[in-house]
Image (cartoon, grey):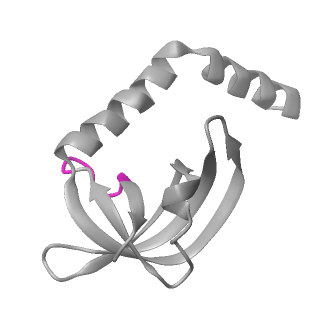
Amino acid sequence: MGFLDKLKGTAKQAMDPRGQMGERDKIMRISKSGIDGRATVNAMRELGSQLGGGREVEFDLTVQGADGGSYAVTTRQSIHEQALAGISQGGQVVVKIDPEDPQSLLVWGAAT
């Protein structure tokens, strides 16, 4: 598969409303029924800006599990600049963890 084929596939996914709807539905499900937790930010990379004052960020996190253990997760999400302001590498963040898939989570903001 060449570069143009990959580019066409990416454009097709972006235009596919089912893909966007599926991601939006997943975010809504996690935000409503997710398990509250905390995580340590090992690394974060800003990938770009979004409409409405958000940033696309990739986080490498160590999540503290309810059983006292921990596990690593890499997640990419859009997050509003106000929520992003207090987040830094090595800091703690509040997360919502998908009860069906602990590797899927949402970063809510800096832990206080």
The percent coordinates of residue 62 (x first, y second) are 40, 76
**The C terminus: image quadrant:** bottom left
Q: Quadrant of the N terminus?
A: top right
Q: Is residue 91 left or right of residue 55?
A: left
Above or below for 99 versus 5:
below
65 displayed left or right of 1: left
Q: Main secondary structure of the magenta part?
A: loop
Residue 4 vs residue 29, the one in the foreground:
29
Q: Look at the image and say whether residue 74 sits in the magenta stretch.
A: no
Left or right, 9 with respect to 59, comes to: right
Q: Residue at x 58, y 75 (%)?
A: 43
Height in image: 86 above or below 35?
Answer: below
Image height of 110 relative to 107, above or below: below
Total numbered labels: 0
Q: Residue 66, image x and y in percent?
A: 15, 73
Residue range in magenta is 99-105
The answer to which quarter of the image holds residue 103 is bottom left
Residue 29 at x, y percent in the picture:
26, 36
Identity of the residue drawn at 66% across and 64% down: 45
- Judged from this view, the residue extending furthest toward the front is 82
From the viewer's perspective, tell me whether residue 5 is left or right of residue 107.
right
Residue 101 is one of the magenta-drawn residues:
yes
Residue drawn at x 85%, y 32% is 2
Residue 76: percent from left, percent from top: 54, 52
Residue at screen point 21% across, 41% down: 32
